Image (spheres, rainbow, N blue to C red):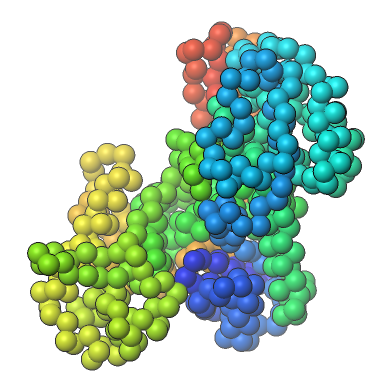
């Protein structure tokens, strides 16, 4: 059996085919087209043609896509939604979407704040106003709305009111309605958790489009025996159905795929990964083979959220970054880039724009295009440009480190040819022959995970008993997401005491991962 991994980036669409022993059989890199499905089809055709593998022997296909991120940033294809917050009268002071941009606020057709919610210790603020919620759902049904975001004060402590509201929503609006519940998506903090839930609800049409489109693309190429999975942003996979329920979890899956692929190719479990594309460079951290999670609120398209996201730093540096010399003799690289038009615009390909790739070719770091076309570039100018590139990377490495000690660094991505291998702060710098398609490899070799997160009072439930239950719940969540039970293992565990809570309360978070069924 073979696995097909595809990752759609802003500049390139990468595809790899690996066998059951996780050996790379074939890999290709295609330019991302304006219609991403054309790019996916081209990549699938190219990798199948290169490998000569029988399509019937492909048993699994995995896709990492930027479509949800693009939809939010570009304000395109977002679905009209209804927003219900359970928290009156306590939370009326700050309405939903209070700090959103006006063009993005337009996705909310109707908003309501009804009675209910909980205190930080789980005590009920007010009973859930079922009648008001039912009336609101009736209004949404009359408007033809098919997606609803439901949030509740301290639902991460108790989700009773959210679950009751979700059940009521389906009873009133029908089973076809898409319901996003905040306790299943975000963490502590009502506004940020609610924001993430609203975005998740607005992405349901985009999710349906790319899941169905990917399956159709495979079918059109005769890949009919493959189970289809989507990459999520913790470096693991989810089923098509799970992706339709939680499309927001695909945001930032590109960098995490690269991190997972880099870990696999280098056989390193702890390192800083530098993924250089055509336009941007993403830096992330491998911890025990998986991406390090961000511990702070993350802004997406101007919206502040607190759902699970990888700890990634992005800088405006890539293979297509434009290089300029200022009047004072200083040289700048980026942040603007020729992007996917590098084969038209870069000097080594006969273009008229000096890019970071041209600098690398001029300095003999790589052999690409026609090097005679950059022979006229002054060597001092090229060295200044490389110094600027080096400084950008070294500063970013320092930003990712948690101590002053040097760290192992892994270079991946098609644009990694522009980076020098002697970087300050790096204990070692590793490159791999397949590093250019590490993102697609990361997608293909990923496991399936489940994460359990809850606030637990150890005075009510002894710590060891609570942690054992949390581990069991995390394993069940991984199995529900598509993992083989026998292969599931705990990959991360933490319990953080919360001094400002009553009793002996801790935030317990357990993550389990296993191989695909």
Where's residue 359, x and y in %?
Answer: 23, 76
Image quarter of residue 154? top right
Placement of the C terminus among the 4 image quadrants: bottom right
> Is 482 left or right of 494, judged from the image as shown?
right
Q: Tell me where residue 352 appears, x and y as whole percent.
A: 30, 83
Which residue shows up at 71% across the image and 47% down it?
80
Residue 153 higher or lower than 20, as above or below: above
- Left or right relative to 21: residue 113: right
Q: Residue at x 17, y 74 (%)?
A: 382
How far across and down, in percent of the image, does residue 492 sit?
A: 52, 38
Task: Please determine whether, in this image, residue 262 is positioned above or below residue 133.
Answer: below
> Which residue lies at the image location 17% right of the left edge and 82% below the top edge?
377
Q: Is residue 254 above or below residue 20?
A: above
Closer to the camera in the image, 459 or 285: 285
Residue 76: percent from the left, percent from the top? 61, 57
Position of residue 421 relative to residue 137, above or below, is below
Taking the image as shown, residue 426 lies to the left or right of residue 77, namely left
């Amino acid at each position: 059996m073979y696995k097909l991994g595809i990752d759609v980036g802003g500049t390139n669409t990468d595809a790899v085919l690996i066998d059951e022993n996780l050996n790379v059989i074939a890999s290709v890199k295609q330019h991302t087209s304006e219609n991403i499905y054309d790019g996916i089809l081209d990549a699938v055709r190219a990798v199948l043609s290169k490998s000569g593998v029988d399509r019937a022997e492909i048993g699994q296909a995995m896709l990492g896509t930027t479509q949800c991120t693009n939809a939010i940033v570009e304000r395109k294809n977002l679905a009209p939604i209804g927003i219900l917050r359970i928290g009156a009268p306590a939370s009326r002071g700050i309405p939903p979407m209070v700090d959103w941009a006006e063009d993005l606020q337009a996705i909310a057709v109707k908003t309501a704040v009804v009675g209910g919610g909980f205190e930080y210790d789980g005590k009920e603020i007010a009973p859930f106003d079922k009648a008001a919620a039912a009336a609101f759902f009736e209004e949404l049904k009359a408007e033809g709305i098919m997606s609803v975001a439901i949030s509740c004060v301290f639902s991460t402590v108790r989700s009773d009111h959210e679950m009751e509201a979700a059940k009521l929503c389906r009873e009133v609006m029908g089973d076809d309605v898409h319901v996003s519940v905040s306790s299943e998506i975000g963490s502590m903090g009502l506004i940020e958790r609610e924001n993430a839930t609203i975005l998740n609800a607005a992405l349901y049409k985009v999710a349906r489009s790319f899941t169905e489109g990917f399956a159709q693309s495979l079918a059109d190429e005769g890949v009919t025996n493959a189970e289809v999975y989507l990459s999520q942003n913790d470096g693991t996979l989810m089923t098509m159905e799970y992706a339709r329920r939680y499309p927001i979890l695909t945001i930032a899956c590109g960098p995490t795929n690269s991190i997972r692929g880099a870990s696999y190719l280098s056989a390193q479990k702890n390192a800083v990964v530098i993924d250089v594309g055509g336009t941007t460079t993403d830096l992330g951290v491998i911890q025990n083979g998986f991406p390090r999670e961000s511990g702070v609120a993350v802004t997406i398209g101007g919206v502040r959220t607190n759902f699970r996201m990888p700890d990634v730093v992005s800088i405006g540096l890539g293979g297509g970054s434009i290089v300029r010399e200022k009047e004072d003799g200083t040289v700048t690289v980026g942040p603007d880039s020729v992007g996917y038009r590098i084969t038209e615009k870069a000097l080594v390909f006969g273009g008229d724009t000096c890019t970071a790739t041209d600098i690398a070719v001029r300095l003999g770091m790589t052999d690409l295009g026609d090097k005679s076309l950059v022979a006229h570039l002054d060597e001092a100018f090229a060295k200044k440009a490389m110094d600027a590139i080096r400084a950008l990377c070294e500063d970013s490495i320092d930003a990712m480190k948690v101590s002053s000690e040097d760290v192992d660094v892994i270079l991946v991505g098609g644009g990694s040819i522009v980076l020098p291998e002697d970087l300050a702060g790096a204990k070692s710098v590793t490159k791999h022959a397949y590093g250019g398609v590490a993102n697609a490899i990361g997608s293909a070799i990923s496991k399936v995970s489940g994460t359990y997160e809850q606030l637990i009072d150890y005075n009510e439930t002894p710590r060891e008993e609570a942690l054992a239950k949390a581990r069991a719940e995390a394993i069940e969540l991984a199995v529900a997401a598509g993992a083989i039970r026998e292969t599931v293992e705990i990959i991360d565990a933490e319990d953080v005491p919360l001094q400002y809570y009553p009793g002996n309360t801790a935030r317990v978070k357990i993550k389990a991962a296993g191989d695909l069924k």
